[in-house]
């Protein structure tokens, strides 16, 4: 059987995953400082209320709307605020599915989308599976991360159809500034490009700069079509309840949402129960997010105290999100360092290379980790750095 050329040539695990599998098979207890699943991090969920939301009589009714149930869209619009209306929203089964629909909407096979670097290693395959090419455009670090608008403009080609930004970025935590937003939307308008803004971590500001663009919805009338993506996975810390959404603003966004509804109608992938439960789940989300923010800030405090006694090590600012970048002397490649920490200290950490961080000298830690585990992990790895 011949497989599509859009798929990887092979499915072998990378060296870090292979080593982790081997150690666990040997019975080794590995402390995971990469955890990103909030349901496994010891947070207190209102379990009875969540179950009740998912067991109301309306979950048994099936009345499919390609744009998504209106009550769910109204609740999401109220969550975001800033004048967003139910008509501006389309529901998806996940943010990843949202990207897939947008890439179908905007590009033909062989077209390009410009994507951020560093970033979570997702865009290459989401674009490739739709027949598009994801061209990474690097940001740069000088006291804080910056969008390289010159590099972005230089990357635009006749086949470019859209620009993707993540606000705040994962894993750098960089929020766009208001000046970057104005320049970015102007660039997209000038070249006739759509702007896709992933804001799944927007509710988790930690050390934000005063000039940050907290959300794309602060701009009520952008000069280019803007499509914002988010979902319950981070907003309500409920990744198992698959619900994402796309909000559209700017010229052409309404027509884009109409076309997206046509695409969604071919799949109707969003389950009726999660749509029926969405208004109540969003009401229950605020205390869960508060617990997460408390955890993130506590782990940052622990990290800063630990780094005070380790002059060769430092961390980068964390404007938002669930990750922190640890800077170390680049005596070896990041992946080699992560493998050494796994083998010698029994601690799993992501190398910066997984996220296309430039050069070597960066490790990526999850601030979502339980506080005792996070502290113990630092204690174990510092002697090996």
Image (spheres, rainbow, N blue to C red):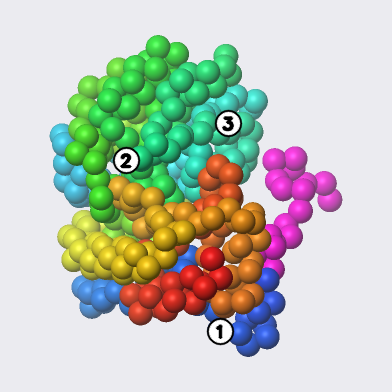
Q: Answer with left or right where residue 163 lies relative to residue 353.
A: left
Label whose residue precedes the other's in the sequence (1 or 2): 1
**3 or 2: mark nearer the eye:** 2
Q: Answer with left or right where residue 149 lies relative to residue 161.
A: left
Q: Secondary structure at mark 2?
A: loop
Q: Position of residue 114 (x, y in %)?
A: 51, 29
Q: Residue at x 36, y 23 (%)?
A: 184
Q: Position of residue 356 (x, y in %)?
A: 56, 45
Q: Secondary structure at mark 1?
A: loop
Label whose residue precedes the other's in the sequence (3 or 1): 1
Q: Position of residue 359 (x, y in %)?
A: 58, 44
Question: In this picture, is 266 found above or below 234?
Answer: above
Do we see residue 261 in this rendering?
no
Q: Residue at x 28, y 32 (%)?
A: 177
Do we see residue 75 in this rendering?
yes
Q: Which mark is residue 175?
A: 2
Q: Which residue is mark 3?
A: 135
Q: Main secondary structure of the magenta part?
A: loop
Does the stretch in magenta take in 3? yes
Does the stretch in magenta take in 40? no
Quarter of the view holding residue 66: top left
Quarter of the view holding residue 350: bottom right
Q: Secondary structure at mark 3?
A: strand
- Rounded to the nearest angstrom, the CA distance separating label 1 from label 2 is 36 Å
- The region drawn magenta spans 1-18
Q: Residue at x 30, y 48 (%)?
A: 319
Residue at the extreme right of the image, as rendered: 1
CB contact under 8 Å: marks 3 and 2? no
Quadrant into which the C terminus falls: bottom right
Q: Which mark is residue 29?
A: 1
**Dot 2 alpha-carbon crowd within 10 angstroms: few under 14, some 14 to 19, many 20 or more:** many
């Amino acid at each position: 059987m011949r497989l599509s050329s859009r798929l990887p040539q092979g499915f072998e695990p990378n060296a870090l995953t292979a080593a982790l599998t081997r150690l666990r098979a040997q019975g080794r207890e590995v402390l995971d400082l990469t955890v990103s699943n909030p349901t496994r991090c010891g947070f207190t969920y209102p379990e009875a209320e969540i179950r009740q939301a998912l067991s109301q009589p309306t979950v048994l009714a099936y009345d499919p709307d390609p744009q998504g149930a209106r009550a769910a869209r109204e609740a999401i619009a109220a969550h975001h605020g800033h004048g967003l209306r139910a008509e501006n929203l389309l529901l998806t089964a996940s943010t990843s599915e949202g990207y897939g629909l947008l890439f179908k909407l905007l590009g033909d096979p062989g077209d390009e989308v410009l994507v951020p670097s560093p970033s979570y290693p997702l865009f290459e395959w989401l674009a490739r599976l739709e027949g598009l090419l994801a061209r990474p455009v690097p940001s740069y670090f000088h006291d804080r991360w910056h969008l390289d608008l010159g590099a972005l403009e230089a990357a635009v080609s006749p086949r470019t159809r859209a620009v993707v930004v993540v606000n705040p970025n994962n894993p750098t935590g960089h929020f766009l500034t208001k000046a970057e937003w104005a320049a970015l939307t102007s660039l997209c308008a000038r070249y006739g490009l759509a702007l896709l803004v992933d804001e799944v971590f927007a509710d988790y500001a930690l050390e934000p700069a005063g000039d940050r663009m907290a959300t794309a919805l602060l701009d009520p009338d952008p000069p280019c079509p803007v499509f914002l993506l988010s979902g319950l996975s981070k907003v309500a810390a409920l990744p198992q309840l698959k619900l994402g959404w796309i909000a559209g603003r700017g010229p052409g966004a309404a027509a884009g949402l109409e076309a997206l509804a046509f695409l969604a109608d071919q799949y109707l992938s969003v389950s009726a129960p999660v749509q029926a439960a969405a208004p109540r789940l969003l009401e229950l989300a605020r205390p869960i997010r508060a617990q997460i923010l408390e955890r993130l800030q506590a782990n940052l405090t622990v990290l800063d105290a630990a780094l005070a006694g380790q002059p060769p090590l430092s961390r980068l600012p964390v404007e938002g999100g669930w990750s922190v970048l640890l800077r170390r002397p680049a005596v070896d490649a990041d992946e080699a360092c992560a493998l050494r920490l796994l083998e010698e200290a029994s601690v799993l950490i992501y190398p910066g290379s997984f996220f296309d961080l430039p050069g070597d000298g960066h490790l990526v830690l999850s601030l979502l980790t339980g506080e005792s585990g996070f502290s113990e992990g630092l204690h174990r790895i510092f002697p090996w750095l």
